[in-house]
Amino acid sequence: MSDIKTRLQKKFMELFGPGAMPKAYFAPGRVNLIGEHTDYNGGHVFPCALTIGTYGLIRPRTDRVLRFCSLNFQKGAIVESSLDDLIPDAKAGWANYPKGVIWTFRRRGYQLAHGADILIYGDIPAGSGLSSSASLEVLTGLMLRETYGFDISMTDLALIGQYSENHFNGMNCGIMDQFASAMGRKDCAIFLDTSDLSYEYAPVKLPDAKIVITNSKVKHNLVSSAYNDRRRESETALRDLQTVVDIRTLGDLTEAQFEQYKYAIKDSVCRRRARHAVYENQRTIHAVEALKKNDIVTFGKLINASHISLRNDYETSCPENDLLAELAWKTPACLGSRITGGGFGGCNVSIVKTNGIESFIEALDRPYAEKTGISAEFYVVDIGDGAHALD
Ligand code: GLA
């Protein structure tokens, strides 16, 4: 970690010129174990922070200029903006994320007295669905809080990140990704109730097993518009249900209640979307119970069921991620496997017996490449802490 910090500090000085040493921060990406597309439906999620994520260095300026540079995008070009010019701008590209967070701070009354130079570097594979944007938002929030001395909780930093993504960047995401990045804890997943943001850390002790992420390396077009469509369809289903039953969100329903009242949902597509949201929420609750009892077999079966529901009812999977899941299910070392995150490509998450990881990778790698012409990537991951300063 300190190695990276030293390298980035050197780079910072080269790019932005000599002066005070910039402070360094880190915010992780996340993988969601179960509870997909439930976070904007008042349900539960079960994500964990990764040890990969986004690093940021910041040095305040004396004027109102903001200068951003990412070592990952736009060939390290400096994107310039100003505290008086915070509007989304296609030319700013990736820098619209930190700009959106600064804009949200200001809307909430946290005025930045002066600008800053900011250097960003991330080690989350691009477009993999492991929340690089949420980590950048939470990182920006943390850097601002620390640099300008604002009194804001980590949960509020997550909410600010979500607000800026919804209102500045046009992606109507829920709270899961930012919450996991801000609040993650080493070796634990977060059992979060998105209806009131109450949460509990659940240790992920997987005796003789590991979390393996498989990147399908596909990202289908229109991800954010398809995501926003799913959200609208769920809301339509909720409104129909509210004509016959007194609920606030889809997360308020048990499976039996859903079966009793589903007739009220007029459109069959919306009915399937709601079925996913209700059943997935209950699966998540059961999965956490199973994990607490060290019943990894049940935990894995619920993970598989989650994929099937995302594939058939919520339709946020795609042929490539379906293929990876099917290959994984056939592998004896695999206890459970499903698409994770927003979907339409990106990564699958699997629980794999430690002594079978090699055979698991072999069983997926070649058949996937033969069928799709794409070479998947595999990461055996550790669960890390939420966003923090690098000392
Ligand atoms: C994306 C969103 C999250 C969540 C997931 C699906 O990652 O940012 O809020 O809705 O999709 O579970």
Image: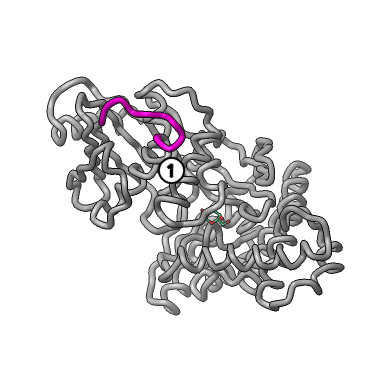
Q: Position of residue 139 (x, y in %)?
A: 40, 37
Q: Residue 292's quadrant in the figure?
A: top right
Q: Which quadrant of the frame does ligand 1 lie within?
A: bottom right
Q: Mark 1 belongs to which amino acid? A: Ser
> In this orientation, which residue lies closer to the viewer: 16 or 243?
243
Label 1 Cα crowd, 10 Å radius (few <14 / some 14-19 / many 20+): many
Which residue lies at the image location 54% right of the left edge and 62% below the top edge?
A: 360
Which residue lies at the image location 83% right of the left edge and 68% below the top edge?
A: 261
Which residue lies at the image location 49% right of the left edge and 45% below the top edge?
A: 163
| On screen, residue 266 above or below 87 | below
Q: Residue 41's quadrant in the figure?
A: bottom right
Does residue 188 show up?
yes
Which residue lies at the image location 44% right of the left edge and 38% below the top edge?
A: 138
- For disc 1, the marked residue is 135
| On screen, residue 130 above or below 158 | below
Horizontal arrangement in the rendering, residue 138 relative to residue 19 (left or right): right
Q: Position of residue 136 (x, y in %)?
A: 39, 43
**Magenta highlight on residue 81:** no
Horizontal arrangement in the rendering, residue 326 relative to residue 111 (left or right): right
> In this orientation, which residue lies closer to the viewer: 269 or 235?
235
Horizontal arrangement in the rendering, residue 280 relative to residue 122 (left or right): right
Q: Residue 6's quadrant in the figure?
A: top left
Q: Which residues are magenta?
A: 106-115
